[in-house]
Amino acid sequence: MYTRWIALAAVVVACTPEDETLEFTADVRVDVAPADGDPESEGTVMCVTPSSKVYVVWVDDRDGTSSVWLNRSLDGGSSWLASAVKVNRGEGAAEAPDLACTDQGVFVVWEDDRDGELENHQIYFNYSLDDGTSFADEDTLLEGDVEGLTMSLGPQIVAVKGDLYVSWFDSLGGAYDIYVASSGDNGQSWRDAVRVDSDAIGEAHSAWPQLAATEFGDVYVAWEDARNGKTDIYFARSDNAGTSFLDNVRLDVGDVPGGGYSFNPRMAVDGDNIYVVWHDDRNGEGRDVYLNYSANGGRDWLVEDQRVDGESEGFFNSLYADLAVVGPVAHVAYHDDRNTGYDIYYRKVVGGVPEGEEIRVETDGPGFSNSVNANVAYGSGSVVVAWEDSRAEAQSGAENGYNDLFYNLSVDGGVTFADEDLRIDSMAPGESYKVEMNVQVVNGEVYAAWTDGRNGTADIYFQHHVLGEGGTFVESDDATASAQ
């Protein structure tokens, strides 16, 4: 029979009539919707500070309109607010939140359709300087289109000390362009947004910017750009805290401009070391993962991009790479269907050059099930790769679309990974869908938040484990076990 497990303590035990046990470390539901309604929650984003304060935002319509909500833990995830805090103040519908956090505050951006009658999305901001307990009385519109005449999408926010930067793509000129707004006082005031892509305004589709910044006022943006026909990957930098940007640089330089479709750029930065990864179809029907690298803060890049996946080029699909960067070293992971089902592969890159062979990270049989959407994090001397995994569905033959969350780690800088995968979530295998996973490693622990369908509607869950440990589930021999 179906059982809904409710997390009441750090460890939950359910007993069968024969006193056999089901035991697992409890996941924590953090969206805490009212008891008289259970709205669909989505758009999970998590941020963890160096002092292990955890913040999670999402959107749901518990108050009748899609709004941004936040919950937080000040003790590394051990305790949470009993009620979620509403972030946005306007009456419009909110979508696609993003979140940044520092020891100084919590900063949230989102898409909002409150302006005008066209239901176009605008980029709004709000902030908290009291650990997420309350937010400013008014939201801040970060763009000049006060009447909502154009569409603005895909906000990202970065916080570095008191400096904040927000990127998005905007149809102000016709086709989408890339914009960045900046603040030097924790969001209490904002400079006018500036355009980043340097072709004629509205001339070509530019979208999905990735944003990074340093404490010295250097701001970096990478994005998809169709100025040459098919989408290429472009980069621009600012050396004056985002008040203007220098000339754009094309990064997918291994083929002719617009020669193939390059998608899904991801960027990570450590000091002057910048890596951008993406997948493209230059080699055939299958997509391959490529990267480019700058060792001097984006001033110079490799003259030829580097292919990361090592299988036959253009034959299989290597997709949706993620990465973490430590000095000149990038830790890159992606999912790949060379074994029929998707597997998670990892490769180490040093100074822009892929090193050694790829490593298949998960430890079930190659291609046995679909393992997708890799998350890469680095901390406490360990590389962590996490992913969504459908091995339980494949084992049972259920074909229900349910999955679980796993991670594996390397303690030797990506040379080897552990012989056993570790569960992040802690419910019975293959009992719900879990998507939108966020993973960070802070102070020797793996933190994760995700969207989860275990209760019949989508809710937001959180879990954390000491590095090298995972969720445990000891299954009873009696399939009719019930909670006590």
Image (tube, grey):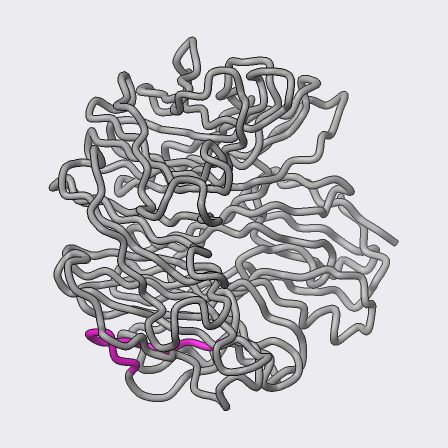
Residue 201 higher or lower than 88, as above or below: below
Residue 410 higher or lower than 72, as above or below: below
Q: Residue at x 47, y 16 (%)?
A: 146
Residue 72 lies within the magenta run? no
Q: Residue at x 44, y 74 (%)?
A: 289
Please give the count of numbered marks on the rendered protein. Answer: 0
Q: Residue at x 35, y 54 (%)?
A: 441
Place residue 52 in its image quadrant: top left
Quadrant in which the C terminus is drawn: top right
Magenta span: predominant SS is strand
Place residue 406 in its image quadrant: bottom right
On screen, residue 211 versus residue 68, left or right, reads left
Residue 412 in sight from this viewpoint? no
Q: Residue at x 55, y 34 (%)?
A: 58
On screen, residue 107 versus residue 37, left or right, reads left
Residue reaching furthest to the top: 137
Expressed as whole percent of the image width and height from the top left, the position of residue 64 reads 70, 18
Residue 192 or 388: which is nearer the viewer?
192
Residue 269 or 473: which is nearer the viewer?
269
> Magenta residues, as a range?
345-354
Expressed as whole percent of the image width and height from the top left, the position of residue 164 reads 27, 32
On screen, residue 162 versus residue 92, left or right, reads left
Residue 224 higher or lower than 413, as above or below: above
Residue 300 higher or lower than 190, as above or below: below
Residue 203 or 19: which is nearer the viewer?
203
Residue 103 or 51: which is nearer the viewer?
103
Expressed as whole percent of the image width and height from the top left, the position of residue 354 reads 30, 81
Residue 187 in sight from this viewpoint? yes
Residue 346 lies within the magenta run? yes
Expressed as whole percent of the image width and height from the top left, the position of residue 100 reads 35, 36
Quadrant in which the N terminus is drawn: bottom right
Residue reaching furthest to the bottom: 312
